[in-house]
Image (cartoon, coloured by chain):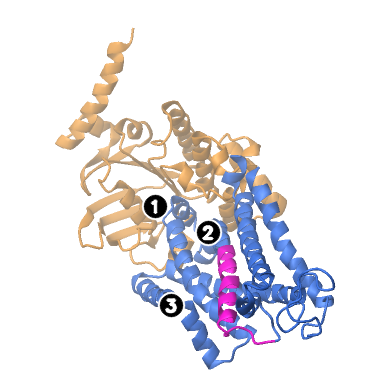
């Protein structure tokens, strides 16, 4: 059985306009799916719809089954119980994804306490372990988010998401806000952690090259609907839709520029 | 560090008024209704700040007034704060139509003049310390609720709320762990400002004769009584006025300092 199955998913704006249309995809346990598309193509809305966390006024249609729970139309309580266990999420901007007035350690401790019921010293030890897993020094636990670097913040956000021990990790442009060198580190870290825990990954990015690096399968979104989907290798080698082709071409063009400048 | 100095200065000013109020509970220079001092005696001599037109000691009444000012200030902030924050949280989390309904009700409450509201409360009950506290607190709750609502909406729109919810945090926990800690520094400063306004509002009520009745000599009543003799004995009007300013400025400084000390992002960027 699929861990995540979206069927004819749609997201509707309060005004009635459909921002995501007829989107279907599935993620098997331990598999990695990439969602690629330009900004405004509905990638992030799709992720939020999967979690049942659409902004106020927006409504989801169709069906999303996540970890055996139907998300579309589910009650708040059902969703609270599902979230964290079935899936958790890492966001684009780590500064705003962490509570500015709470020490990092406490923010990571929250999900651990809820999920594993740890208290006191055991909880503290678990937080330190979570920090070392994302290669952060222990002192970060006592720091506020504004006191650490962007890359460290994103590592902390990843530790928070992983602390729930989810079956599926949704990463929404997790490296876009970071410096290029830090990007590679965070990607490698994410890759290792997901593989090590046998988690499934839903990776969202506008950058086809980054998605090709981490995802086995890919869905290409344009203006709210899927224009192409398949194994990442096939899509990159033989793009069928003109939009996908332009994505692939522009990725190669940048690459070519580097080759040209190389000695 | 700026916050610490502001806080200390505020504490000194508020402490001055607080000390007057506390001392007034156990010791007063004269009995408040003692009229043996002679009419409009000048400062100095047996009466440190002189006497009023009935021969009562001014310092005695200022000390009793400090007690009343602090009681009204703290009481109405308690009433207004509890009602306002509760209504604001409700509106902030509410769905569209409930939010609209609450906002409309709050707008009406805010648009209603405080003094008119106070007169209504006094008409229904009676002119007393309690009535003044209820009236000022009620009027204050509208402003506090409006502010709370906006602050809550702003915090709820942030990514870290979504991030926290993706890990399965329930609504009550969200309020206590993320929403309240993020809005209280701003709320606190506003409540302190409101405390200052409440003291002023009580002075206005007393000035109009709607405040606590005699023998509760509030600063507002002292101002009113000194009105007729302000040219012959200005100290009677100046002293309560100065104390009002001291308390209001002091409370605002304390709130400013508290915010700077409480906010970790301000604390480290000194």
Residue A85 visible, this orientation: no
- Number of the front mark, 2 or 3: 3
**Residue A117: where, in percent of width, then height?**
62, 58
Mark 1 is surrounded, within 10 Å at the Cα level, by few (under 14), some (14 to 19) or many (20 or more) other residues, namely: many
Which residue lies at the image location 45% right of the left edge and 35% below the top edge?
Answer: A191
Which chain does the numbered disc 2 sit on?
B
Say whether disc 2 or disc 3 marks the residue closer to the N-terminus. Answer: 3
Residue range in magenta is: B191-214
Marks 1 and 3, how far apart in space? 52 Å
Relative placement, left or right, of B236 versus B144 is right
Q: Which chain is blue?
A: B
Secondary structure at numbered mark 1: loop
Q: Do the CB atoms of the residues marked 1 and 3 lie less than 8 Å apart?
A: no
Neighbours of disc 2 within 10 Å: few (<14), some (14-19), many (20+): some
The quadrant of the picture occupied by the C terminus of chain A is: top left
Chain A: drawing colour: orange
- Residue A53 falls within the magenta-colored stretch: no
Which of A81/B215 is in front? B215
- Residue that mark 1 sits on: A3
Q: Main secondary structure of the magenta part?
A: helix
């Amino acid at each position: 059985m699929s861990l995540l199955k979206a069927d004819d998913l749609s997201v509707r704006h309060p005004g009635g306009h459909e921002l995501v249309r007829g989107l279907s995809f599935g993620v098997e346990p331990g598999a990695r799916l990439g969602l690629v598309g330009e900004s405004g193509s509905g990638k992030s809305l799709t992720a939020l719809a999967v979690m049942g966390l659409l902004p106020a006024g927006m409504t989801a249609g169709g069906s999303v089954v996540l970890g055996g729970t139907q998300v579309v139309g589910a009650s708040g309580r059902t969703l609270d119980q599902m979230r964290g266990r079935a899936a958790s999420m890492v966001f684009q901007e780590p500064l705003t994804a962490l509570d500015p007035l709470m020490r990092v350690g406490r923010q990571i401790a929250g999900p651990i306490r809820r999920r594993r019921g740890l208290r006191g010293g055991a909880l503290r030890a678990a937080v330190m372990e979570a920090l070392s897993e994302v290669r952060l020094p222990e002192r970060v636990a006592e720091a506020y988010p504004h006191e650490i670097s962007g890359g460290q913040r994103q590592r902390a956000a990843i530790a928070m998401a992983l602390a729930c021990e989810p079956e599926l990790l949704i990463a929404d442009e997790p490296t876009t806000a970071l410096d290029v060198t830090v990007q590679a580190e965070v990607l490698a870290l994410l890759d290792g952690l997901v593989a090590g825990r046998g988690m499934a990954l839903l990776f969202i990015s506008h950058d086809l090259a980054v998605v090709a690096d981490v995802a086995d399968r890919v869905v290409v979104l344009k203006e709210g609907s899927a224009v192409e989907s398949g194994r990442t290798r096939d899509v990159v080698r033989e793009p069928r839709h003109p939009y996908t082709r332009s994505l692939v071409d522009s990725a190669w063009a940048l690459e070519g520029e580097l080759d040209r400048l190389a000695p | 560090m700026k916050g610490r100095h502001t806080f200390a200065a505020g504490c000194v000013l508020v402490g001055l008024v607080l000390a007057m109020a506390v001392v007034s509970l156990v010791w007063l220079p004269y009995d408040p209704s003692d009229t043996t001092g002679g009419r409009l005696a000048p400062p100095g001599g047996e009466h440190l700040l002189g006497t009023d037109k009935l021969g009562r000691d001014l310092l005695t009444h200022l000390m009793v007034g400090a007690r009343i000012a602090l009681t009204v200030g703290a009481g109405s902030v308690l009433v207004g704060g509890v009602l306002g924050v509760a209504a604001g949280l409700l509106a902030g989390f509410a769905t569209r139509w409930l939010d609209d309904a609450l906002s409309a009700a709050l707008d009406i409450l805010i648009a209603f003049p405080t003094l008119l509201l106070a007169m209504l409360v006094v008409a229904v009950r009676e002119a007393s310390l309690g009535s003044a506290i209820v009236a000022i607190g009620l009027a204050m709750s509208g402003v506090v609720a409006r502010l709370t609502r906006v602050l809550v909406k702003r915090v709820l729109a942030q990514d870290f709320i979504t991030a926290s919810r993706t890990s399965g945090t329930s609504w009550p926990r969200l309020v206590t762990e993320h929403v309240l800690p993020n809005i209280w520094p701003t709320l606190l400063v506003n409540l302190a400002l409101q405390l200052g306004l409440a003291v002023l509002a009580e002075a206005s009520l007393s000035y109009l004769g709607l405040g606590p009745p005699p023998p509760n000599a509030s600063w507002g009543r002292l101002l009113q009584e000194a009105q007729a003799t302000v040219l012959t004995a200005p100290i009677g009007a100046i002293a309560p006025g100065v104390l009002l300013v001291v308390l209001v400025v002091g409370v605002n400084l304390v709130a400013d300092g508290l915010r700077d000390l409480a906010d970790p992002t301000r604390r480290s960027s000194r």
